[in-house]
Image (cartoon, grey):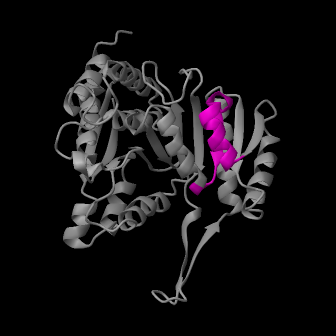
Amino acid sequence: MKKYNISVIGGDGTGPEVVDEALKVLEQTKSKFDIDFNFIMNDLGGDRYLKSGDLVTEADVVELGNSDSILLGAIGHPDVKPGILEQGILLKLRKEFDQYINLRPVVLYPGVETPLANKTPKDIDFVVVRENTEGLYAGAGGYIHYGTDKEVATQESINTRSAIQRCIEYAFEYTVKNNRKKITLCAKTNVLTYAHDLWERVFYEVAEKYPDIETDYGHVDAVCMWMVKNPEWFDVIVTDNMFGDIITDLGAMIQGGMGIAAGGNINPKGVSMCEPIGGSAPKYTGKNVINPLACIAAASMMLDVLGEDKYANKIENAVIKTAQKLDSLSAGKMGMGTSEVGDMVKDFILNDEE
């Protein structure tokens, strides 16, 4: 029997609730796949910060680093200034564990409604590979003359060839492994003429090693337009940190909303962290109305990263079946409670005959 040590960060707002459902699904289906889990609970988040001032401590780094993977609920507290938790926890962990890939499948499941007219699951099925440690999110910049009428704020985009290359290589290898056919580089070479020229040069250098994969390029504004008008054009998109952040939220909307979207912060040779894309939704905390499917899908992604493909696929199939049973993916409109949704996913897995 394989055993995995999973560090669990429920986080803020409804994060602990959706994580509880993901853990329930794993705990009650693991024996079917001859797998065991040791869940290590961690209290990182807004409440701890407000009590102690701690964000990520050395003890947290040791504990998380000794796990096989991290499952995260949500970070974001209404009583903490925006940016503190995001920078001090999310970005800190991505950099600490060199989770240099943010992987975001954008898949419209059967029976899930998309806001795009006349589009079906065969039209919305692509993956965004986002560089996750550099760009405008690297934290380079600062102020001079802060708080005066002469104030200057700078925020620099950091782009190194090594980080760009490993991200693009991951995208090509992912494309091969998953039998996809095309990669689109999403950038802005006509304005960001230094940083994105480097991205484009590395992209086509790497592409030479993969002659069977079709490649193309799109400015980020055009990519946004075509994601809405013709999402079927896309297969795999590779992009930088900020543009990836933007287009993946657009992707979540066209696949049916935040209630179904999961993502992974991945270090292919280290500790990865998977999470639902939606925020902490504090107004729904404790009401048993938040949709846990995205977090359960994140658990499926976590298993896939760990190499447990069969188990991951069974959970994803159960999520698809459950989504078809809901009145809506939106909080409070599902037609059942958070825990009932988790139970339904679990039951679909347990009753799935080989």
Is residue 158 found left or right of 151 in the rendered image?
right
- Give the residues in magenta: 219-242
Is residue 36 something that shows in the picture?
A: yes
Is residue 331 found left or right of 143 in the rendered image?
left
Q: Residue at x 60, y 52 (%)?
A: 243
Quadrant of the rendering where the C terminus is positioned: top left
Number of numbered discs on residues: 0
- What is the residue that sits farthest to the top in this orientation? 353
Q: Residue at x 27, y 61 (%)?
A: 78
User: Taken as a whole, is the magenta stretch helix, strand or loop?
Assistant: helix
In the image, is residue 116 above or below residue 192? above
Q: Position of residue 45 (x, y in %)?
A: 28, 59
In the image, is residue 163 above or below residue 224? below
In the image, is residue 103 above or below residue 31? below
Q: Assess whether residue 227 is covered by the magenta stretch.
A: yes
Q: Assess whether residue 211 is covered by the magenta stretch.
A: no
Q: Position of residue 292 (x, y in %)?
A: 30, 35
Q: Residue at x 66, y 51 (%)?
A: 166
In which quarter of the view is residue 256 placed? top left
Q: Compare residues 29 and 288 and report the one nearer the observer.
A: 288
In which quarter of the view is residue 199 placed? bottom right
Is residue 268 something that shows in the picture?
A: no
In which quarter of the view is residue 233 placed? top right
